Amino acid sequence: MACSRVSTLFVVATPIGNLEDVTLRALRVLREVDTIAAEDTRVTRRLLLRHGFRKSMLSYRAPVEERALPRVLGALEQGDVALVTDAGTPALSDPGQRLVEAAWEAGHRVVPIPGPSAVTAALTASGFSGAGFCFAGYLPRKPGELRRFFESISEADHPTVAFESPYRLRRTLTVLAEVLPERQVAVARELTKLHEQVVRGTAAEVLDALGERVRGEITLVVSHG
């Protein structure tokens, strides 16, 4: 269904840690749009203030995406909107996919503003990057499903990248060590932040290197067979 006014929804990638990683284009778009739809307005406000400006914002968080959707679409009827999440690229294991789809359906333009991504940062740092990779999003929480997932990638001819909670990482690496004991993996922790760490080896070796307490944002890369 066409809308009465054609506006642009900008899907804007923001820093995954270091606030200096935002692109010049992203800053220009964030300054120029009429409204910013933010996963957490407090996080986005810190980014804007770091670069010297303020902006009108709407909250667009994962738990209430459907409820917030009409407000953001209403804002698009009035002018251009930038969609941002707390870190990285919207709609990749973050809120945004439903809004992008709805914007297309309403007849608006959708323009990506590329930038920081934990997926590509971890992949390039791992040394496993090549002609392609598979992004799995967040790993299964149930042990049985997690084991079946690792079994399913045992014959993959490309690396697999996934997100994991620091609270479940040791359990995940333990299962991985059982299913694919010889496979090389890399755990990228707190990328671009003060305590950034990339540990590489077999799952068992990485477990030993990380120690008992693991904190921060985790991206796991499993090499191909």
Image: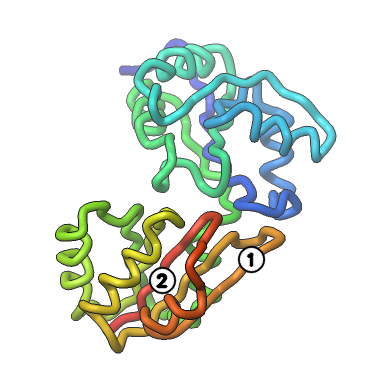
Quadrant for the N terminus, please: top left
Where is residue 115? Give x, y as percent: 60, 53
State which tag comes first along the sequence, 1 or 2. Answer: 1
Neighbour tally class for label 2: few under 14, some 14-19, many 20 plus, Cα within 10 Å? many
Q: Which SS class for mark 1?
A: loop
Most extreme residue toward the bottom, as rendered? 182
Residue type of the residue flagged with mark 2: Val
Residue drawn at the location 67% of the way across and 43% of the way down: 26
Q: Is residue 8 above or below residue 207?
A: above
- Alpha-carbon distance for marks 1 and 2? 16 Å
* Residue farthest along the front direction in this orientation: 212
Rendering quarter of residue 63: top left
| Viewer-side residue, 64 vs 12 | 64
Q: Position of residue 10 (x, y in %)?
A: 55, 35
From the image, tell me which residue sits under label 1: 196
Give the residue drawn at x 47%, y 13%. 71
**Mark 1 neighbour density, 10 Å: few (under 14) some (14–19) many (20 or more):** few
| Quadrant where the C terminus is found in the figure | bottom left
Q: Which residue is mark 2?
A: 221
